[in-house]
Image (cartoon, rainbow, N blue to C red):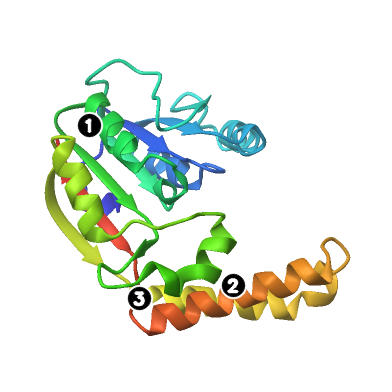
Amino acid sequence: MAANLTLDGSVRVLDLGSGYGGASRHVAKGYGSHVTCLNLSEVENDHNRKRNEEEGLGHLIDVLDGTFEDLPFKDKTFDVVWSQDAIVHSGDHGRVFAEAARVLAPGGKLVFTDLLAADHTPVETLGPILRRLHLSSMGTPGYYRKLAAKAGLTELKFDDLSEQLPIHYARVLEETERREAELLKRISADYLERMKAGLREWVARGQAGDLVWGIHYYQR
């Protein structure tokens, strides 16, 4: 993602749904850019702050509690808005795109990855996947393009990396099964079986071409 952006010490980056902050540390350490992390989980944010200090990056990374449907920033604050597999969890995708566009400076870039259904995929075929993510529906590339255009964003390109999805989830399933005895000490057998069933569905739907994943680039 970073390789297709112009990043240096003058660039202001906002990481939406930053999780434990791995991407933000990569950008701050590798390019010297100042990164603001916005994330809902206080547990993840505390871990993020701790790691940043341990790695001597606290002066380059701010970590804020919040949601990406209501960004606590002024208009035109950032040069790059960055997000990895987080927008899917929003209940208002249009609001996320509108807020991202609002806080981007003119010419600024929105770059993100997200878990999407293919435009041709009937939503009823995604039941196990939606249940695993606690969602009622998933976005599609066409749907996201419409939301981005409505927010005033221009699509630059999409790097389609969908073939990586079934490889990734097959590896997660393999590791889950390998550590099953260990996991059963922490979670119920029923929960574990549902987890494995969901992972198998990710693999099957990915191999069938029903899911889309890649890197999206838009400009304000």
The residue indicated by pointer 3 is: 210
N-terminal-most mark, 2 or 3: 2
N-terminal-most mark, 3 or 1: 1
Q: CA distance from mark 1 to mark 2?
A: 34 Å
Instruction: Let me know if residue 172 appears in the view.
Output: no
| Residue type, numbered disc 3 | Asp
| Residue type, numbered disc 2 | Gly
Instruction: Let me know if residue 127 appears in the view.
Output: yes
The residue indicated by pointer 1 is: 101
The residue indicated by pointer 2 is: 198
Residue 158 sits in which quadrant?
bottom left
Front residue of this view, candidates 201 and 170:
201
Quarter of the figure with the C terminus: top left
Label 2 with label 3: CB-CB less than 8 Å: no
Label 3 residue SS? loop
Label 2 residue SS? helix
Residue 172 at x, y percent in the picture: 59, 73
Density class for disc 2 (Cα within 10 Å; few <14, some 14-19, many ≥20) is many
Where 38 falls versus 211 (above or below)? Answer: above
Q: CA distance from mark 2 to mark 3?
A: 15 Å
* Residue at far front of view: 124
